[in-house]
Image (tube, helix red, strand yellow):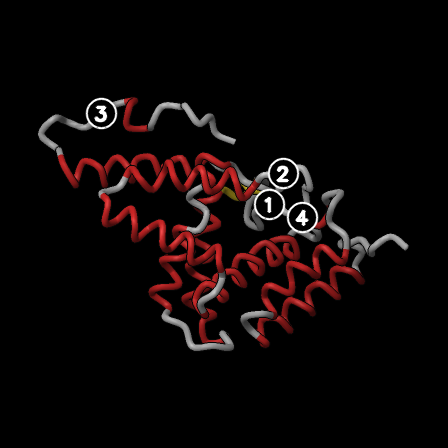
């Protein structure tokens, strides 16, 4: 988790005084967003021997929304959905990543992320702060077709990376079949087709010994 009192990125080299007002606030927020590239997730990359960072994850979800929207069980606004996935993990700049299979990491996740949202999004001009916060809240609530589909992509992407890595985070101590199936349910909730594909991946992962069965 990032230090709540750490300096802003822009403090390293403040913008020229001639840049002020609304544009200054927007550029300072954009600079702070660079920290998202440093937040490592548990998921390993398929293309390199390192872990994925939050910025890469968000880009991958945006690509998945664009390509897989046709499989949503409810019609979705693709442009709006892409906004949701771009914003959804920005709070981790301050809250840090909370690996789903690590029980200790998710204990106070909600509180940390709300505090991070309160701090981060208020850097923007008030109208944009409200808009961006509303996107984050929408994703978290998962009450719209777009948010449900984006949540599904957020479940499917690490499952695909785990498959490509012959286990990946499925090897973490807290990852048993029921916990993996709980993540699969988030895909099923938004897409029958993608849910079936995810089920095939999980069944094959179990057969290959990459996912541990629940203890008796």
Q: Mark 4 points at which residue?
A: 168
Label annotation for residue 14: 3
Measured in 3D between alpha carbons, the distance from the residue under mark 1 to the one under mark 4, in whole angstroms, is: 6 Å
Q: Name the residue under label 2.
A: 105
- The quadrant of the image that shows the C terminus is bottom right
Pointers 1 and 2 in contact (CB under 8 A)?
Answer: no
Q: Where is residue 19 in the image (x, y as percent from the top left)?
A: 12, 33
Pointers 1 and 4 in contact (CB under 8 A)?
Answer: yes
N-terminal of the two: label 1 or label 2? Answer: 1
Task: Identify whether 215 is placed above or below 41.
Answer: below
N-terminal of the two: label 4 or label 2? Answer: 2
N-terminal of the two: label 1 or label 4? Answer: 1
Circle 3 sits in a helix, a strand or a loop, which is it? loop
Pointers 3 and 2 in contact (CB under 8 A)?
Answer: no
Circle 1 sits in a helix, a strand or a loop, which is it? strand
* Nearest to viewer (mark 4 / mark 2): 2
Measured in 3D between alpha carbons, the distance from the residue under mark 4 to the one under mark 2, in whole angstroms, is: 18 Å
* Nearest to viewer (mark 3 / mark 2): 2
Q: Residues within 10 Å of mark 3 (few under 14, many from 20)?
A: few
Q: How crowded is mark 1: few (under 14 residues within 10 Å), some or many (20 or more)?
A: many
Label annotation for residue 120: none
Label annotation for residue 44: 1
Measured in 3D between alpha carbons, the distance from the residue under mark 3 to the one under mark 1, in whole angstroms, is: 35 Å
């Amino acid at each position: 988790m990032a230090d709540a009192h750490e300096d802003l990125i822009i403090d390293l080299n403040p913008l020229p005084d001639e840049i002020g007002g609304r544009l200054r606030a927007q550029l300072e927020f954009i600079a702070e967003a660079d920290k998202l590239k440093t937040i490592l997730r548990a998921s390993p990359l398929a293309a390199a021997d390192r872990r994925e960072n939050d910025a890469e994850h968000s880009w991958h979800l945006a690509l998945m929304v664009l390509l897989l929207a046709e499989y949503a069980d409810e019609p979705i606004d693709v442009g709006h959905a892409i906004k949701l996935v771009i914003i959804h993990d920005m709070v981790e700049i301050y809250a840090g990543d909370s690996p789903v299979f690590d029980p200790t990491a998710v204990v106070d996740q909600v509180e940390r992320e709300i505090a991070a949202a309160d701090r981060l999004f208020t850097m923007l001009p008030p109208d944009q702060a409200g808009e961006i916060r509303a996107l984050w809240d929408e994703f978290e609530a998962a009450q719209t077709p777009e948010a449900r589909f984006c949540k599904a992509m957020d479940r499917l992407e690490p499952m695909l990376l785990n498959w490509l890595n012959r286990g990946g985070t499925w090897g973490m101590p807290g990852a048993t079949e029921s916990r993996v199936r709980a993540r699969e349910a988030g895909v099923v909730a938004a897409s029958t087709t993608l849910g079936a594909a995810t089920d095939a991946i999980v069944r094959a992962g179990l057969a290959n010994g990459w996912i541990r069965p629940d203890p008796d």
